[in-house]
Structure formats: C-alpha cells, structure tokens
Image (tube, rainbow, N blue to C red):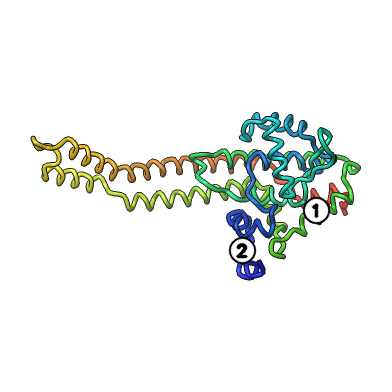
Amino acid sequence: MYYISMVVDDLSPAFLLDHPEIVTPAAPWCCWLTNLELAILLLTQPWLSEEGLSRADLERQLGRLGVGMPVGAIYFQRVNRAAAALVAREQLVGRGTGRTRRFVLTPAGFAAMLLNLQVVRGDPTVDGRRFEFKRALVSMANVVLDRLLELPPEGSLGPSLDEWFDAVDALTVWGRPVMNDAVYADAFSVLRLVERQQERVRQLERLAEARLAGAATPAALARQARLAQAGGAIGAPDADLTAILQTARSLAAAGLPQLSARADLVRYRAYQGYLTELTTLYASELRVVDMGLFRRVMTGRTG
C-alpha cells in the first residue's frame, strides 16, 4: 500500500471511485454508491436529524423522496439491506437496537456522498437516472442548506458538529487528505455537475464521430452490392437462396455501424441542448450555498 501511495498522484473523485481495487482496501468508505444509498446518506445528515432516523423513518421519508427521484422501489427489506451495507462501510452509524435503532451519517459517509456527486459515468442519453438523481439531490441539498442558514443563531448545533466537520477534513487515502474547499464547492454546485455531464457527452460524441469516420460509406456499400451481383450472388437465375441471404446480411451489417453512429450523434447533440437549458435555468434560479459559511453558522462560529 505504501508503494501505491507513492506512485499515485491523482486523488480526484473520479480516480478514487474508478479504482476500487486499490482504493477500497485502504479506505472502505470511499466507494461508488447506488441512488438509494445516496438518498439515505442525504436524509441522515446530522443537521437534518441530530438523533438519526429509524428504519421505519427511512422507509417513510424515502417513499416521499422517491416520488420525484429515481431511487427505485422502496420497501422495508431493501432499505434495511442498504442501511446495513452503509454501516458496514462506516458511512452510517447505528445507535440502539431493534426497532429503536437509529442511523446517523458519519464523516466518512458525508465524504463518500460528496465524491459520488462529482463523478458522472455511462451514457446519460441511454439511461439518465443517475445524472437526474444527482441533479435533483444537489438542488435539494442547496435549498435545504439555504433554509437552515435562515434559522436563528440558537438553531446551531454547536461544538459537536464542528468536531464532526473536523473529522471529515481529516479523512485520508494512503495517508493523504482527500477533502478540501474545492471538493465542497464542486459537490454542491449543480452548474459544475451539468458541466461535467457536458464534457462526458462530448467524449461520447467524439467516439461516435470516430466510429462514423471508420464505417463504410453508402458509396462503398453500393460498390459491394454491384460486385456481389456481378459475381452472381444476387440476381443470377440459379443463385442459391442461402448465398443471397448471406450477402444481404453482410451488406446490412456493413451499413449499420454508420447508421448507428449517425443516430448516436443526433441523440448526443439533442442532449447537449438539454444540458445548455439546464445551465441557464440553474444559473438564474438556484443559489449555491457556501459550505464554509454553512459550517460556521451551524457550529456557532459566525465570527
């Protein structure tokens, strides 16, 4: 592990979450989270529920949350399994036993949530649930934090929360800190999330353009068809049906990559328009909360 820490300079959220084979053994809390797990971590933040939430509380609140967010089916056994997995990774802590057991977000869980909010994967034009969930979660978090800042000073949680944030700042991977002001700022910025998604879609566009450049053109396909016909595979009176079908399949297969790449480009460019509209919307309608200010206010250190 010492060797890994010496050769790996990149401790970005993307690197940490994309290399579980080397990161997780050193920091089990630093891992990719499902939408349901992210939702549980959001609901158990100490400034939302200082005493924590029971399994029944989680199921009830997740049910309400799931109406407008893609977290999947909500039922007791699934929530229970997700909470148990989070506890095992020290992202949640359970207090009490049985039906009175309550769950609270740990500093490690908070850090894992922030790292996950900064990484986009896959093709959002095929399955956009992950991005849409993160977009909704970050928006909700900003609205909640903004409302909490409006509370009177006696609403602060005091020194215990200050120590909690200190524990977040102290988290390390291979002895090196992973949390800083940039991580906080990026995690709670919907505009940065959209920007990362725009870059991801641009990458997918470039891949589609490369596929298109390497695919057979209509003219080339027409030449193949003429050559096949001239060779007697198509149109000859004694042509074998199997040979005709094989030639037709070959020509169709040769043309599909180009058609598929062009369709992908249409989809990616349309999606970029959606992301541009989101940027305009959030820039004018949503205020990004300063987590440094939030920490000072909620811990009573306003000076």
In percent of the image, x 63 and y 35: which residue is there? 71
Which quadrant: the N terminus?
Answer: bottom right
* Image location of residue 166, percent across then percent down: 81, 56
Question: Quadrant of the rendered structure where residue 98 is?
Answer: top right
Q: Position of residue 60 (x, y in %)?
A: 74, 29
Label 1, on which residue?
165
Q: Nearer the viewer, residue 218 or 33?
A: 33
- How would you rate the neighbour count of disc 2 (Cα within 10 Å): few for under 14, some for 14-19, many for 20 or more? few
Q: In percent of the image, x 69 and y 40: which residue is there? A: 82
Q: Do callouts 2 and 1 mark residues in contact (Cβ within 8 Å)?
A: no
The residue lying toward the viewer, choosing from 200 and 176, is 176
Q: Which residue carries the number 2 mark?
A: 10
Q: Amino acid at mark 2?
A: Asp
Q: Does residue 110 appear in the picture of this structure?
A: no
Vertical order, 239 against 6 (above or below): above
| Disc 2 from disc 1: Cα separation | 24 Å
User: Which quadrant does the C terminus fall into?
Assistant: bottom right
To which quarter of the image does residue 231 belong? Answer: top left
Residue type at the position of mark 1: Phe
Task: Pinpoint residue 78: horizontal percent, then vertical percent.
Answer: 67, 34
- Of 178 and 218, nearer the camera is 178
Q: Secondary structure at mark 1?
A: helix
Q: Residue at x 79, y 40 (%)?
A: 103
Q: At x 9% / y 36%, what residue is drawn?
A: 238
Disc nearer the start of the sequence (2/1): 2
Q: Which mark is residue 30?
A: none
Q: Position of residue 115 (x, y in %)?
A: 66, 52
Q: Is residue 50 left or right of residue 73?
A: right
The answer to whether residue 220 is seen in the rendering is: yes
